[in-house]
Image (cartoon, rainbow, N blue to C red):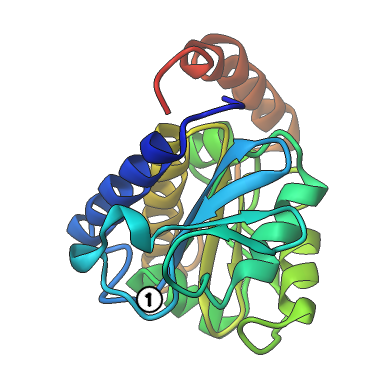
């Protein structure tokens, strides 16, 4: 994925923003998207711009230290979180921060979504943990997100939303959709006495199967 053209990254980010809005995973200017262009450089959505109004030049290019290199806007207020996650996880090439309804509901309860759905285990890697609360845009929130994600692909942000990561846009959009679906099922099953979790041994098999047979297929796909 490295050495992606800036114009291609900007186009993909805008298209993904519209897809997230269509799926009701974001609303208005809330949430943010970033994508690596090179090892120490990534594109990120600007602060305070609705996704249906974004133009290529609105997408900001920053280096690993968060210094703006190109773009006419100010980077997203969650820039620090994106920087921290890329630093902690070099395998991540895309990060999406959503404010979807059920993910926000569970995040407001500050609960972890347990591993009870197969696709959640396969794609996300296990439970969707909730990061400790911190004010949006702070270094504290950035570090809390890193801790909550651990070795998985997503986490909830207490009283805020969710952060979803992946190797490419397609995978990360899928992660965001599964987070919301899992949160919705969690809310429903909590009212019915609680779901029965998938055991750790089976979860390990499911995750390994996905990584071997599905994740690798996306390695050469357009991001």
Q: Is residue 72 left or right of residue 21?
A: right
Say which residue appears at 49% left-offset and 35% top-offset. Answer: 118
Residue 76 drawn at (x, y percent):
51, 72
Residue 155 drawn at (x, y percent):
62, 60
Q: Nearer the viewer, residue 163 or 59?
A: 59
Residue 24 drawn at (x, y percent):
24, 64
- In this view, the residue farthest toward the bottom is 135
* Disc 1 packing (10 Å; few <14; some 14–19; many ≥20): some
Query: Number of labelled discs?
Result: 1
Say which residue appears at 71% left-offset and 59% top-offset. Answer: 83
Q: Is residue 12 visible?
A: yes
Q: Nearer the viewer, residue 36 or 68?
A: 68
Q: Is residue 100 left or right of residue 197?
A: left
The residue pinned by badge 1 equals: 30
The answer to which quarter of the image holds residue 211 is top right
Say which residue appears at 54% left-offset and 20% top-offset. Answer: 215
Say which residue appears at 38% left-offset and 39% top-offset. Answer: 7
The answer to which quarter of the image holds residue 50 is bottom left
Q: Is residue 120 above or below residue 133?
A: above
Q: Quadrant of the C terminus?
A: top left
Q: Nearer the viewer, residue 63 or 95?
A: 63
Q: Is residue 212 above or below residue 201?
A: above
Residue 124 drawn at (x, y percent):
58, 41
């Amino acid at each position: 994925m490295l050495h992606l053209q800036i114009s291609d990254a900007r186009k993909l980010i805008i298209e993904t923003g519209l897809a997230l809005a269509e799926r009701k995973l974001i609303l208005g200017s809330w949430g943010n998207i970033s994508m690596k262009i090179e090892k120490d450089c990534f594109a990120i959505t600007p602060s305070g711009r609705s996704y249906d109004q974004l133009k290529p030049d609105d997408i900001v290019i920053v280096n690993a230290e968060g210094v703006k290199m190109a773009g006419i806007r100010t980077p997203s207020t969650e820039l620090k979180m994106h920087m921290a996650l890329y630093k902690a996880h070099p395998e991540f090439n895309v990060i999406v921060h959503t404010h979807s309804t059920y993910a926000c509901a569970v995040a407001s309860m500050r609960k972890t979504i347990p591993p009870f759905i197969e696709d959640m285990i396969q794609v996300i890697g296990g439970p969707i943990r909730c990061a400790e609360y911190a004010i949006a845009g702070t270094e504290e929130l950035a570090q809390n997100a890193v801790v909550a994600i651990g070795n998985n692909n997503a986490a909830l942000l207490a009283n805020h939303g969710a952060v979803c990561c992946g190797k490419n846009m397609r995978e990360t959009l899928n992660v965001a959709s599964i987070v919301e679906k899992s949160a919705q099922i969690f809310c429903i099953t909590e009212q019915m006495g609680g779901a029965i979790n998938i055991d750790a041994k089976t979860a390990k098999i499911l995750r390994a199967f996905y990584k071997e047979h599905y994740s690798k297929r996306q390695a050469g796909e357009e991001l």
